[in-house]
Image: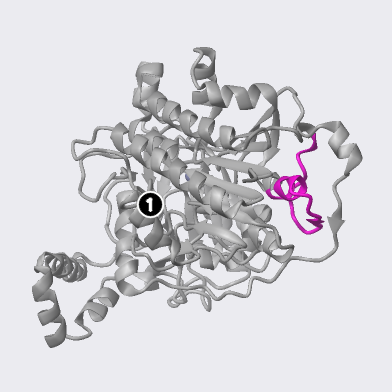
């Protein structure tokens, strides 16, 4: 059996802010070995540093204006309603698409936003965008049943590892990590991928659920224990790499959360957004209640109801896509959780009120200037920058990106865009489960991690890289030519100068591959399932 030429281990949200103190305490021996024998770097993530966007930039090497994946959801044709997205919405080639063309074998395990599992020469298991059902979960498809027979139900780390009491569920984290390693090693033996890329979600989830515990108790915290569990997983994968190249990456960092700003309530205060009248909202609450009731019907009766009320579910599902915003009286609104503002433009949004051109520019500038003045509860400024989308992004998918991006200081604050609930104050919270008393206590940071060890690596001081540098570096390490239109660079400072001398990076003129696959929506029942899970992660309303 041949070990992978390159093993990429992704630890979603892993940060040196946790790793360094634990290394200093003599913990994380396996991550220590990778860092000590190779080169580490802080990895500057995307703006916003959000999982779907960040991983997609990492695996494609291009910006969101080209790959088109911005958030867990995107706005539909009306410009208002949100649909959950998945890997099929990606509009730029990932490294594995390129490797498939050159006939290289690849193994992918749980990379976020890879549902349906990509066709590769090798194997793929979809990421957190997968619906729980088997469709699209693996490639080859029959792998799903095989894995279930051999390993039991898949312990996917796609939900928050908290007990019903809101306590970190370390047993689940351990079980999920161990099973993932077992599955990965088994499939790697069998398919012998040249590139093996596996992602663990636990650090991200434990940051959101328990960051203050890390600040209070350090090495004794659940956050530290989660990193130790992940370190064990890293150790087993490094061992299986048998001395070949290993890369460690995260898609962004993590840290404290000081507060959540309800940007729609703020826009309403500033006179840019108008809420509908409460009576209309009541009507919609009724639909919601009806929907919830439906779930309580025993399964055997559901069929009976379905037969007699065919199409009701679809009609109800459509009716559920409502908002509390009076679009015809609104000039701008927010959606998502990280600070997005969309101008309600005539001709682009169904009930647009702002003329494109001068009026659009003026409204956008006004809002940007006012947003810079948003203050925290103690009167301190909390917004670091407000970006116009074209200042950070370019490409044919730029319409997927909101007009203004509010970047809060250090992402210690988040900017939520509630469209289904009306808020009286601009201060909000993100629940871990809908209606739960437990809420987000941790947030993301721009700085993630990168490290390279193995025969191609050199030993150097820690440097800094951009997230888009990962894709060209992976292609280089696999002996591929690098397409000239990738936006990142080969991280040469982490590579042995002799290796670079012998084989300097070669660039290929061929411009970006077309990704021909049409975006694939979820079946209504799958959409409901995925939405419920994302709601459970606090990412959608
Ligand atoms: Zn992430």
Q: Is residue 453 above or below residue 478?
A: above
Where does label 1 land, which residue? 539
Which residue sits furthest front?
1
Q: Is residue 375 visible?
A: no
Number of residues whose C-alpha sits closer than 10 Å to that of mark 1, classed few (under 14), some (14–19) or many (20 or more): many
Horizontal side, residue 239 vs residue 428: left or right: right
Q: Secondary structure at mark 1?
A: loop
Horizontal side, residue 413 vs residue 356: left or right: left
Q: Residue sitting at 81 percent across and 32 percent down? A: 496
Observer-nearest residue: 193 or 477?
193
- Whether disc 1's CB lies below 8 Å from ligand 1 is answered no
Residue 162 screen position, x and y as percent: 27, 38
Q: Residue sitting at 19 percent across and 66 percent down? A: 288
Q: Is residue 248 above or below residue 311?
A: above
Q: Is residue 476 above or below residue 248?
A: below
Span shown in magenta: 471-492
Q: Is residue 361 visible?
A: yes
Residue 353 screen position, x and y as percent: 47, 72
Horizontal side, residue 7 vs residue 479: left or right: left
Q: Residue sitting at 29 percent across and 61 percent down? A: 420
In the rendered image, residue 97 lying in the magenta stretch gets the answer: no
Which residue sits furthest top?
25
In the rendered image, residue 474 lying in the magenta stretch gets the answer: yes
Q: Quadrant of residue 272?
A: bottom left
Observer-nearest residue: 3 or 162?
3
């Amino acid at each position: 059996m041949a070990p992978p030429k390159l093993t990429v281990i992704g630890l979603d949200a892993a940060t040196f802010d946790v790793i360094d103190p634990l290394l200093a305490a003599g913990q994380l021996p396996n991550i220590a070995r990778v860092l000590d024998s190779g080169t580490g770097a802080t990895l500057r993530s995307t703006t916003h540093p959000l999982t779907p966007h960040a991983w997609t930039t990492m695996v494609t090497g291009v910006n969101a204006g080209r790959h088109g994946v911005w958030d867990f959801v995107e706005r539909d044709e009306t410009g208002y309603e949100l649909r959950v997205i998945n890997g099929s919405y990606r509009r730029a080639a990932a490294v594995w698409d390129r490797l498939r063309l050159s006939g290289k074998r690849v193994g992918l395990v749980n990379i976020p936003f890879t549902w349906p599992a990509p066709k590769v020469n090798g194997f793929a298991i979809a990421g957190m965008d997968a619906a729980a059902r088997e469709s699209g979960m693996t490639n080859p498809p029959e792998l799903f049943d095989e894995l279930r027979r051999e390993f039991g139900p898949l312990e996917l780390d796609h939900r928050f590892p908290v007990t019903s009491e809101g306590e970190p569920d370390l047993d689940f984290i351990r079980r999920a990590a161990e099973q993932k390693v077992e599955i990965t090693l088994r499939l790697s033996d069998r398919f012998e991928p040249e590139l093996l890329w596996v992602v663990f979600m636990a650090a991200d989830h434990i940051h959101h659920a328990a960051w203050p515990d890390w600040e209070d108790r350090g090495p004794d915290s659940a956050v530290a224990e989660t990193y130790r569990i992940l370190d064990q997983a890293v150790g087993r994968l490094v061992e299986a790499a048998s001395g070949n190249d290993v890369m460690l990456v995260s898609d962004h960092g993590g840290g404290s959360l000081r507060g959540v700003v309800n940007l729609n309530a703020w826009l309403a205060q500033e006179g840019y957004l108008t809420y509908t009248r409460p009576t209309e909202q009541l009507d919609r609450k009724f639909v919601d209640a009806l929907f919830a009731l439906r779930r309580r019907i025993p399964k055997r009766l559901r069929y009976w109801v379905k037969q007699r009320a065919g199409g009701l579910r679809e009609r109800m599902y459509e009716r559920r896509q409502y908002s509390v915003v009076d679009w015809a009286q609104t000039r701008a609104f927010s959606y998502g959780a990280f600070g997005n503002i969309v101008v309600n433009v005539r001709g682009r949004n169904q009930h647009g009120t702002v003329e494109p051109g001068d009026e659009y520019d003026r409204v956008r500038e006004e809002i940007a200037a006012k947003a810079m003045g948003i203050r925290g509860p103690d009167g301190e400024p909390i917004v670091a920058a407000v970006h116009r989308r074209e200042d950070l992004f370019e490409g044919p998918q730029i319409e997927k990106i909101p007009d203004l991006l509010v970047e809060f200081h250090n992402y210690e604050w988040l900017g939520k865009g509630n469209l289904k609930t009306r808020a009286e104050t601009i201060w909000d919270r993100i629940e871990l489960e809908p209606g739960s008393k437990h809420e987000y206590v941790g947030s993301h940071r721009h700085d993630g991690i990168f490290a390279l060890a193995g025969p191609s690596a050199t030993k150097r001081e820690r440097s800094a890289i951009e997230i888009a540098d990962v894709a060209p570096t992976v292609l280089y390490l696999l002996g591929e030519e690098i397409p000239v239109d990738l936006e990142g660079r080969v991280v040469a400072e982490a590579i042995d100068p002799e290796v670079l001398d012998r084989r300097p990076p070669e660039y290929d003129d061929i411009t970006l591959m077309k990704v021909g696959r049409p975006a694939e929506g979820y079946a209504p029942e799958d959409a409901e399932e995925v939405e419920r899970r994302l709601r459970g992660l606090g990412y959608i309303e």
